[in-house]
Image (spheres, coloured by chain):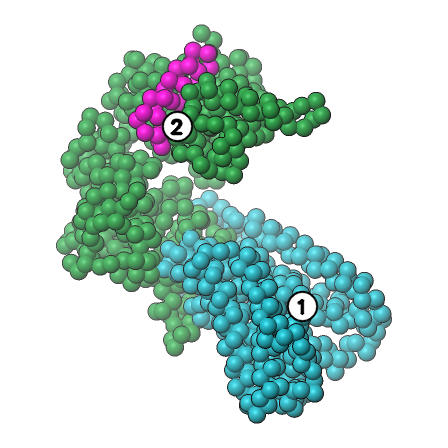
Amino acid sequence: MDTPENTGPDELPRRFGPIASLVRRELLLVGAVLVLLALIAIRFPAFVTPANLASVFNDTSILIIMALGQAAVIITRSIDLSVAANVALTGMTVALLNAHVPELPLLLLVALAFLQGLVLGAVNGFLVWKVGIPSIVVTLGTLTIYRGLAFVLSGGAWINSFQFSAGFLGVPRAEFLHLPLLSWLAVAVVAATTLVFDRTSIGRAWFAVGGNPTAAVYAGIDAGRTRFLAFCFSGLLSGLCGYLWVSRYAVAYVDVASGFELDVIAACVIGGVSIAGGIGSVGGTVLGALFLGIIKNALPVVNVSPFAQMAISGAIIIAAVTLNTRAERKGGRIILRPQVAAIPAE
Amino acid sequence: MAPLLQLRGISKFFPGVKALEGVELTLRPGRVTALIGENGAGKSTLVKILTGIYQPDAGEILIEGRKVHFDTPEAAQRARITAIHQETVLFDELSVAENIYLGHAPKNRFGLVNWAAIRARSMALLHSLDAPIKATMLLKNLSIAQRHLVAIARALSVDSNVVIMDEPTAALSHKEVEDLFRILARLKASGKAILFISHKFEELHRVADDYVVFRDGRTIGAGRMADATHGELVHMMVGREVDQVFPKAPATIGAAILSVKGYSHPTEFDNISFDLRKGEILGVYGLVGAGRSELCQSLFGMTHPSAGSVAIDGTFVSIRSAADAIKAGLVYVPEERGRHGAVLAMPIVENVTLGSLGAVSQRGFIRAAEEFKLARHYAQRFDLRASSLSQPVGTLSGGNQQKVVIGKWLATKPKVIFLDEPTKGIDIGSKSAVHAFMSELAGQGLAVLMISSELPEILGMADRVLVMKEGRMAGFFDREGLTAETLVQAATGNMGALR
């Protein structure tokens, strides 16, 4: 049989490799988040009060939701640069509708935001699938197109807080069990994405196509269609965030969420989603987003100038990614690890 | 004449595989030496050692009597050894001249690339090869034969003493082969030592002065080409006791499950017809590039045929995708399971159920308990060695990865299974397990099609053998009285195709 087997009890299996290193990475991230909070607490204890932490979570909710959509895309070895432009365009659409036809029910607007986001994501996915353009090129193009459309829709005008209906602004802020609805929405999306990633065939297909496209094809998975659906998923969540963003900041204009796609991608990468595809998890992505959210919220509090803030965020992203790639490489090297014992019966 | 290059006792081991064991090789200036051997005999490993890509685990390399070590490909190049590989490694977006001089471009006195010299020398080189190519053309605009000429020009641009040609004629037409032989004669005349690797015996008899035969990583014979007959060479290449190595258990062979008629592809294969019967193992033998994998991939729905029909259980089917094929009860276990078979980052359980998620799902959601049950069933059936089913497949040994991949296919409950080089690169123990298992599958009434380049495997396992040559059927043989020689002759096209 294979040579390295049955090497004795102290060689008993430990879980290694990409999946297990993901678990380790999540623990590492939890540790990093705790250390970060402790450091901040030394300078500014009020930051770590439950109320403030809840507010930081609420502030990071949109990033969490969008990062989960992006994670699906990156896991299939693609990238979606158009998510922030999707937010701007979808946000503008619902803002205009609310401002001009205030009697439209909020539920309809939210459904519309979902639908439009889905369509914008589907356009990306279609171009990647049927036209065969690399996703970075497709979404670089659509990111400009979507923002351009937001300008066309609004004529460059701003929609300000007084133009929105009370419900439009109020509902995400409504508190339920001490947390705003926005936070609960993020929790719901986390739960739903976990279900999709772990328990549906499309989620499984995302990982298979990203991990080994050829093997996926031999298993009867249509790689193009699978990627298309990942872009749809990302678009759907971005559309929702279009409404959430405009409601949260009570303003809609062309440059809403400008550059936010980079934060979204950074959250994924910090959270251990492999740019090479096939590796990633909901837990890691959420932790990556939280890590970024805490930094963004804490730096102003500890009196760091806005310019230094950007530099520090950037440096932390690179540091986190360096750690991740090192962990990944280590995992990758352990290919012929001794295994013991056949799989036992139930 | 004194040898230019000598290999003594060269060995190379990979985990679980002895690629080369004490091989000997002597190359003399002005002579062409043919290197003959089956696929997997160790020829490519030897080329990689000679060009510094691999380092031998034992043995020595001598150049003009002096011991040398090639730690890097550059070291081999400095020792004036150059190789023209089976698949030329060139750059599509660069010009012919840049391709020829990449890595050793002449410099001007400021240390910058001397473009004028590159162009002039490239043109001179191409002219000396009678190549109708301009040095300024982009490589991507050249034909395969022209690319070969560029590869040869590149090899000659470093003024080597030893030129290795690894199946240089595989992709060439008859006329291009003649051109190549003229170049070969010129190289010989200029005193270069040439190692020529080919499966085509008629070529070898024409161009080679000496021969060396490899089998299973060992040197079996060497001598002057003029003294050896074709039959002797084939015997050296394949000769071994094969009866006991791969036992196929007797199985009742039933009605045809898969019927293929006049199946053709625009470029890869033409007019293939065969029946695959219940309980049967059909071996498909041929040289690399004969179109065997392409045929099976097309039957599996990954490429589309230009003509022909496929029937499963007597009903004509149209298979347009791999999903269609799996639904029709057909599965394909590809060669190179790492690349094509398993998703290495995924746990065993998810790999096993990847092709049959429908069976373990309810209302669109995968049920973890069902999924583990299915995976555990196949893990036990194949005696899979792993610490847990949640272990990523990438952490398993090659043989165990193969078990996971085969488990994945069986989980789809197929009627027909295609196995492409099922035991390539796995160790002897796992090999016999795979063979026993194939017998078992056939015994349970599956129809098995096995692509293999290993003659003992074909002779031991197959009930019937389809031989392919250059995309066409070159013979169909029953197990009774079949010899390795017959198969090799059909596959290499010697003494006429036997039908």
Q: Is residue A244 above or below residue A226?
A: below
At label 1, the amino acid type is Ser
Residue at the disc numbered 2: B168
**Would residue B226 be found to the left or right of residue A249 on screen?**
left
Position of the N terminus of chain B, as image quadrant, is top left
Please identify the quarter of the rendering in which residue A222 is found: bottom left
The residue located at (20%, 26%) in the rendering is B495
**Is A323 within the magenta?**
no
**Would residue A56 be found to the left or right of residue B66 on screen?**
right
Q: In this view, does A311 lie above or below A239?
A: above
- The chain whose colour is green is B
Tell me if I can see residue A336 in this picture. yes
Q: Mark 2 lies on which chain?
A: B
Q: What element carries label 1?
A: loop
The residue located at (60%, 24%) in the rendering is B116
- Give the camera-side residue of A202 and B139: B139
Q: Where is residue B399 in the image (x, y as percent from the top left)?
A: 41, 48
- Give the camera-side residue of B62 and A59: A59
Position of the C terminus of chain B, as image quadrant, is top left
Q: Give the range drawn in magenta.
A: B169-196
- The chain whose colour is cyan is A
At label 2, the amino acid type is Pro
